[in-house]
Amino acid sequence: MVQRRLRVRLQTVLVLSLLALLSNGCAARPVHPGAVNKFDSDAYDALLVTDSVIQTTRADLVNNVFPPSIAPNVKDSLNYLIRAYNVADIAYRTYHTAALSGSATPVQQADVTTALNQVSNATSTLVNAKAGK
Amino acid sequence: MPLLILTIIQAALTALSSIKGNVGADAALASALTTIIQNGLQAFQAATGQPLDLTKIPLEPPVV
C-alpha cells in the first residue's frame, strides 16, 4: 500500500516537472537565426529535442538501464520513434530548403506538421513502454 | 531553473533507487526518464538563440 502511494507520487512528480518544463520552454522560445519563420524554428526545435531523446534512449538500451521485462518494448518503441523522426526530418529539410528560396508550399508545411504529430505520438508510445505499460 | 529542479528530482530518485523492491525499481526507471528529459532540455537550451544547424538533427539509424 505504501509502495503504491510512493509510486503514484513518483509518477505525479515526473508529470508535473515535465509540464513545468514544457510551459517554461514555450514561454521563451526565440526564433533561431537562419530560420525562415517561427514555424521553421519551432519544427527545428522539436526535431532537436527528439533527436536527444533518441540518442539518450539508445545509450540506455546499450547500458541495460531497462529491466529485461520491458527492454524489448522500449526497443520496438524507440525504432517506431526513429522511423517517425526520420520521416519528419526529411519533410522538414524539404520545407526548409524551399522556404529559404521562398517557394515553400502549404502542402510542404502541412507535411511537416503531420510528420511532427506522428513523432509526438511515437514519443508517447516510447514513454509508455518505459513505464512498462 | 528547470534544469536545477530536474537535478534535485534526479538526486531524490537516485536515493529512492537504492530501496529494494518495487519502489527502487520504479525510482530507477523514473530516474532514467528524468535523465532523458534533462538531456532534451539541455539540447533545447544549448540551441536557444543559436543559428539553425541541420547537422544537429541527423537521420538516425534503427536500433538492432
Image (cartoon, rainbow, N blue to C red):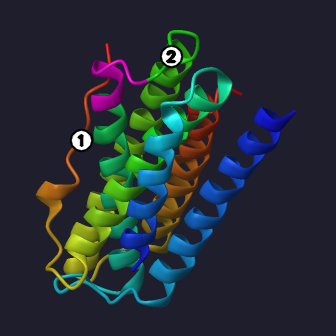
Q: Which residue is more in the foreground, A71 or A65? A: A65
Q: Quadrant of the C terminus of chain B?
A: top left
Q: Residue at x 30, y 50 (%)?
A: A52
Q: Does residue A16 belong to the magenta stretch?
A: no
Pointer 1 with pointer 2, Cβ within 8 A: no
Seen from this angle, which residue lies furthest right?
A1
Q: In which quarter of the image is the N terminus of chain B?
A: bottom left
x and y percentages locating residue B63 in the rendered image = 32, 20
x and y percentages locating residue A81 in the rendered image = 46, 37
x and y percentages locating residue A69 in the rendered image = 58, 10
Q: Which residue is more in the foreground, A70 or A40? A: A70
Sort mark 2 into few (<14), some (14-19) or many (20+) by Cα contacts within 10 Å. some
Which subunit holds the residue at mark 2? A
Three-letter code for the amino acid on which mark 1 is drawn:
Leu
CA distance for labels 1 and 2: 28 Å
Name the residue that disc number 2 marks: A67
Name the residue that disc number 1 marks: B59
Vertical placement of B1 versus A55: above or below? below
**Disc 1 and disc 2 on one polypeptide chain:** no
Q: Is residue A17 visible to the viewer in this orientation of the structure?
A: yes
x and y percentages locating residue A70 in the rendered image = 57, 17
What segment carries the magenta color? A59-65
Q: Residue at x 58, y 40 (%)?
A: A127
Q: Which residue is more in the foreground, B31 or A30? A: B31
